[in-house]
Image (cartoon, helix red, strand yellow):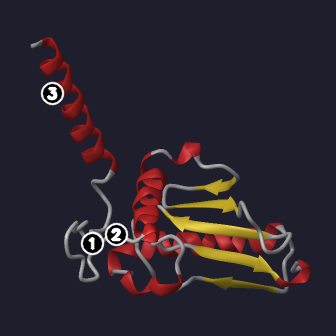
Amino acid sequence: MRRLLKSALFIAVGVIAGGYLFRDVQPRSFLALNDCRGACYRPNDLAGLLASAGIQRVPGVLPFVQRETDSCITIKHPFPTAKTHFVVFPKRDIKDIGSIAVEDSPAVLECFAHIHWLVARHNLTRYHVLTNGPSRQNVTYLHFHLVSDEDLN
């Protein structure tokens, strides 16, 4: 009986924690075990779901944070393609640029304010800002790369 109570408590804590972590994320395809028909999670979808929960709930554990506001977080890219390479994430769960809704506008604009801040702070004049479409994303979560052309590898 005691083991059953421990198991029930463990499941209840898991459900509550999962509900808290994933309450503000966009729906993603449901995991179908027998016949996916394009509806199964891809690794980048799962990475996006985890990124969304992490950025929204526990941003303090992200490495390389350069700047953080209520709506956006900026990190130094962990595997940069140039000396100056940052990644800027809105704290709202947005899958890609084609999924932006009107209510997402403040978070996206705040991300562009972060990019402006980085450009000014690093005196960048030759740079590009990019985001990938759904089929090119390694992580299904809207993010922007700021890469300086002045120091490309």
In what element is the residue under mark 3? helix
For the residues labelled 1 and 2, the Cα–Cα distance comes to 6 Å
**Could you tell me which residue is drawn at 25 percent across and 47 percent down?**
19
Q: Which residue is mark 1?
A: 29
Q: Residues within 10 Å of mark 2 (few under 14, many from 20)?
A: some
Q: Are marks 2 and 3 in contact (CB under 8 Å)?
A: no
For the residues labelled 3 and 1, the Cα–Cα distance comes to 28 Å
Q: Which residue is mark 3?
A: 8
> What x and y, as percent, mark residue 51?
47, 58
- Residue sitting nearer the eye, 106 or 30: 30
Q: Which residue is mark 2?
A: 41
In what element is the residue under mark 1? loop
Closer to the N terminus: mark 1 or mark 2? Answer: 1
- Name the outermost residue toward the top: 2
**Could you tell me which residue is drawn at 39 percent across and 81 percent down?**
100
Count of all numbered marks drawn on residues in the image = 3
Kind of residue at disc 2: Tyr
Kind of residue at disc 3: Ala
Specify the quadrant of the image occupied by residue 35: bottom left
Specify the quadrant of the image occupied by residue 39: bottom left
Q: Quadrant of the C terminus?
A: bottom right
> What x and y, as percent, mark residue 148?
81, 79
For the residues labelled 2 and 3, the Cα–Cα distance comes to 28 Å
